[in-house]
Image: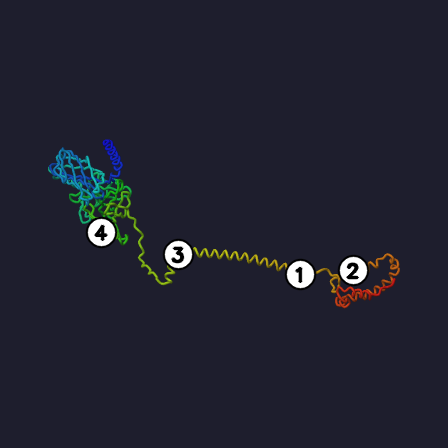
Amino acid sequence: MKKRVTRWVVMIAAVCSLMLFPALTGYAADGTLMLSDPTGSVGAEIPVTVRIDAGGQPIGDANVTLSYDPAMLEFVSGTNAQGGEGTVTLAASGTGTETELAFELTFKGVAEGTAAIQVTESTAYLFSDETLNLTAGEAAVTIGPGDGTAAASESTERVLGTESIEIGGMYYNIYENFSDALIPAGFSRSTVQYAGAEHAAIRQDTSGKVFLFMISGDGDPIMVLYNESDSTFVLAERVDVSESFYILILASGDGSTLPEAFVETSLSLHDMSFPAWQNMDSMEFYLMYALSSSGVEGFYQYDSIDGTYQRYVAQTSVSSEPEEEEDDSALGKVEKIITDNLLILALAVAVIVVILFIIILVLSIKLGRRNAELEDMYVGDEEENKPNVKKKSRQQFVGYDDEDDEEEDYLEDDFDDSDYDDEFTDSEDNYDDEFDDDDEYYDDDYEDEEDVKEYTPGKGDSAGKKESYEDIDFIDV
């Protein structure tokens, strides 16, 4: 039973270890392993420098194995180096402040010709125990005749330019015979004219910038930016940011356009001093001028704690105009409230204007309808009060009544009796004469309204009307 439990515990532990293994794997950074290309003679000591660059990050442990042709070279000594019979091993550790490790080796020339020193194995780590992948080069050692006189001098002139150039307080010579291992990615071999002579150089494919390799004394070759327009030189140092991206820190740059928080200072990289601008608000950050592997030139921000670089984008400068003092009075507070809530006030005013417009529109419509109703009412009253004028007739005279028509009908009925037709016909002539006289009297009485009124005692008085008719003399038939 105990064996089964132990077995299960071991299996669980193994599974947990496999699950945790990816988390324990560190990020692999990129570095460079470079070897110098010295020149010597048979029987003379030839110095060879091996340099491991961690790309600007603190370096930890490093182990390198070199191979060489013992028929051409003999290993003599070296710092942190042991070897012989064609093999040399190098081992060193950083303290957390270095970004590179350098090994100085000494060989002796055995035979004339060119001997190669190659890297057969290498392992390196950052100080944070992250793996450092190294891009290794090789050395080409040129060995001249054994007397070491004319041939050696001729070889030296071929490798170094005769012109001594001062850069940053130090004197350098142009390094002509550099190997392809020193050429960064994105550059191609080229030539440049300087001081009336042609020199070997490299040119960036994207930007067209020209760089030369130079050597000061027995030191390693360095890259120098050459300005073809004014024949000036600017020191450069390569820093690998990622596996496929690097920047070349330049000893130049104008910090006049930077914010006031950045103060000019300097930083040391590989025993060379470069101008930098420190952020006084965040002391661990610096700005350095550089050219990227993609050909972009500008400021890059350096984090001195993490050892990382990032492209810096300049912020818009703040206006130097003095700020207005805040008014603490009641009017000032009201103005501040209005200013802070200007948009809300504008929306409120717009809503009020719309509401007033709607009210005015409704009132206008109601007022128009009311005016139309009043106009219709007044027009109707005028038509009702308008006098009803009829054709002139006897009914228009004052005192005339419908009873007069009834009386006339009565008289006509009396005179329509057929029994009297003959008698009336016989005496028609006599009657007409007398009646004509009476008609004249009757017409005279009705010529105007005033006579009618005097003649008629009263409107609707039938008795008066009868009396008026009795006054008329009729002819006895």
Mark closer to the observer (3, 2): 2
Identify the element where label 2 is drawn. helix
Which one is closest to the eye, mark 2 or mark 4? 2
Left or right of residue 186, residue 68 in this image: left
Q: Residues within 10 Å of mark 1 (few under 14, many from 20)?
A: few
What residue does disc 3 label?
A: 341
Label 2 Cα crowd, 10 Å radius (few <14 / some 14-19 / many 20+): few
Quick check: 467 above or below 18? below
Contact, CB < 8 Å: mark 3 with mark 2?
no
Labels 2 and 4: the sequence-earlier one: 4
The amino acid type of the residue labelled 3 equals Asn
Quick one: label 3 or label 4, which is nearer the N terminus? 4
Q: How many labels does the image show?
A: 4
Asked if the residues shown at circle 2 and circle 4 are in contact, with their CB atoms under 8 angstroms apart, the answer is no
Q: Foreground residue, 432 or 264?
A: 432
Q: How far apart, in angstroms, are the residues tagged by discs 2 and 4?
A: 140 Å
